[in-house]
Image (cartoon, rainbow, N blue to C red):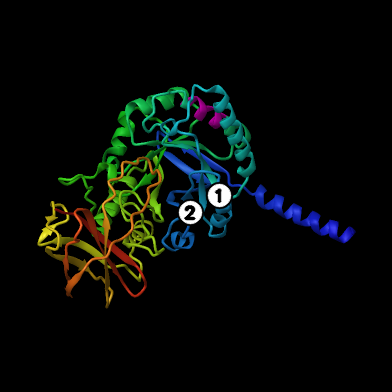
Amino acid sequence: MFSRFFVAFIISLSFLNAWSQSSVIEIKNSNNKFQFYKNGKPYYIKGAGAKSNFKTIVESGGNSIRLWSTNKSSLLDSAQKYGLSVCQGIWIAQERNGFDYNDDYNVKGQVELIKKEILRVKDHPSIILWGIGNEVDLKYSNFRVWETIEEIAKFIKKVDPNHPTMTVIAGLDPAKVFMIKKYCPSIDILGINVYGAIENAPINIRRFGWEKPYIVTEWGVNGPFEAKVNNWGAKIEPTNGFKAKQRLRRYQEIIEKDTDMCLGSYCFLWGQKQESTSTWHGMYLSNGNPTEAVDVMHYCWKGYWPEKRAPSIQEIFLNGESWKANHEFNDRDVIELSYVIDKYNNEKVYLNFEIYPETFSTQQGGDFQKSPKKIDFKIINESNNKLVLEAPRKNGAYRIFVFAKNDYNQYSVANIPFKVR
């Protein structure tokens, strides 16, 4: 009886000791040059928005992940296993999804539940900062949401002074910066989700009056909400090769260059999701395999390309016209799909082709989108860098995808929307 109690006591002590080793984070300011410190050492965030593939993040040179909520706190243990720090998100209900910030009862209930979650996970050793809310400013009109953000941030300051507070906004504008400065003094860092707007982010964050450090909490290629559309409203998605160059330039010439105010970044998305297409933001495919975007982050974080590198689809054409053009056909027309691929150091590149109906999604802010089902189509001939096919028989809008992979299941993807009259 005694021995069982003693063993249980030792286990309990070990558990408490593991959770008592939480990191101590400081933000030092020297002549308006901010520096992030973890346990007394400078720490630059090389992060990804991720819920899986943690091993690859580490192998690619990353050191941190961003989570959007405390719903899956087991991910904290997974991150710790791989030596990754965590920006722990706290999900704040959004007005655009029906939450009323004039309803004091529901606001109070939300805050009390969040406080319990904070107390539950705050001492986990992988946590380095708190992300209070994600894009609560998207299509909002009730400014009282900032009162909730401040109440949570103030609570964190009281119960967890070792980890800084951050709130994350959708893009940048002077009104949002003003509201956070005025109503959220307990916020230490501004998190910005910027895609096309990243081009001017370092200039604008200063021009709009933000005087504390910031983190680029979501970034990558231009989003579907910023994309050009063709004659029938389908969004035009660049090739993976185009995206790779854009992603690399934005990291090197924008994020890394702001050494005064930017504490690091979290690329989006270290995984896969349907957002207008199944390949727009995802750095992985739905089959779980990586795209060349992962190689790009390896280069960003380590300064050199991985030994095993994905091929890269640079261009894609339908009947000789690029992915930027309008493509309209009659049913059963013969279509010639061609493409330009950089093989890099791959001896063989394998190709696969799929056609899906167009989704015309109007969802925003990362809301769930249902993936369409691929359709069968007739291949007439396939040769080097060319596929001849027959247009679908049913009128409508479609999108044809080209998937190129190497022997290690690393992919590059490109697609073109087209219409059958």
Query: Dot 1 corresponds to which residue?
Result: 72
Label 1, residues with CA under 10 Å away: few <14, some 14-19, many ≥20? few
In the picture as drawn, the residue positioned furthest to the bottom comes out as 347
| 150 in the magenta segment | yes
In the picture as drawn, the residue positioned furthest to the front comes out as 394
- Where residue 80 sits in the image (x, y, percent)? 56, 55
- Where residue 325 sits in the image (x, y, percent)? 13, 52
Quadrant housing residue 375: bottom left
Amino acid at pointer 2: Lys
Tags 1 and 2 touching, CB below 8 Å = yes
In percent of the image, x 43 and y 23: which residue is there? 143
- Where residue 290 sits in the image (x, y, percent)? 37, 63
- 164 or 223: which is nearer to us? 223
Query: Dot 2 corresponds to which residue?
Result: 51
Magenta range:
146-154
Rendered position, 46 above or below 343:
above
Quarter of the image with the N terminus is bottom right
Amino acid at pointer 1: Lys
Comes first in the chain, label 1 or label 2: 2
